[in-house]
Amino acid sequence: MMVPLGDSRGRACWLLEASRDPLLLAVKFEGTVRVMDGLCPHADAPMALARIAHGDVVCPLHWWRFDPRTGAGLTDPAAPLRMYDVVLMDGVPHADIPDGTRSLNRLSRGPRPVPEPGRRSARH
């Protein structure tokens, strides 16, 4: 499935309007747009209001952090965000989502413990 990236409207992070399942988040970082899962693996929070802080994608609900280049979970390394390729179709960028891809949710992943208070990304 090819999903157009749409207009960022000046934002660093935005949900792709054409995506429902999986919900997709576009992230503009270091001059490149990347696409990753749009649900935080911690509490299934939509990442619509995610932001970039100190070089990480930060979930707006509980501040879980992810690497914008790889989707690696920085708050919980066992809980990454899937990444998707961005390709050009007739000069327009699209996310290339494999057929049959569905959003991961807590039921399919099992419960995730909340990290200890004050635990920060390994990069900080």
Image (cartoon, grey):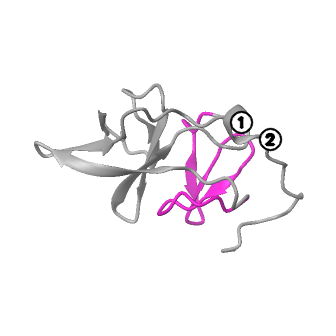
Q: Residues within 10 Å of mark 2 (few under 14, many from 20)?
A: few
Up/down of 13 relative to 4, above or below: below
Q: Give SS at disc 2.
A: loop
Q: Who comes first in sequence, dot 2 or dot 1?
A: 1
Residue at image coords 71%, 67%? 121
Which x, y percent locates residue 22? Answer: 48, 32
Up/down of 81 relative to 107, above or below: below
Q: Main secondary structure of the magenta part?
A: loop
Q: Which residue is mark 1?
A: 106
Up/down of 98 relative to 123, above or below: above
Q: Are marks 2 and 1 in contact (CB under 8 Å)?
A: yes
> Going by the image, does 44 lie left or right of 49?
right
Amino acid on which disc 1 is placed: Arg
Which x, y percent locates residue 13? Answer: 47, 46
Amino acid on which disc 2 is placed: Pro
Up/down of 92 relative to 119, above or below: above
Question: Which quarter shows the C terminus?
Answer: bottom right
Q: Is residue 68 magenta?
A: yes
- Front one among 48 and 43: 43
The CA span between labels 2 and 1 is 6 Å
Residue at image coords 60%, 66%? 54
Which x, y percent locates residue 76? Answer: 73, 58
- Front one among 117 and 73: 73
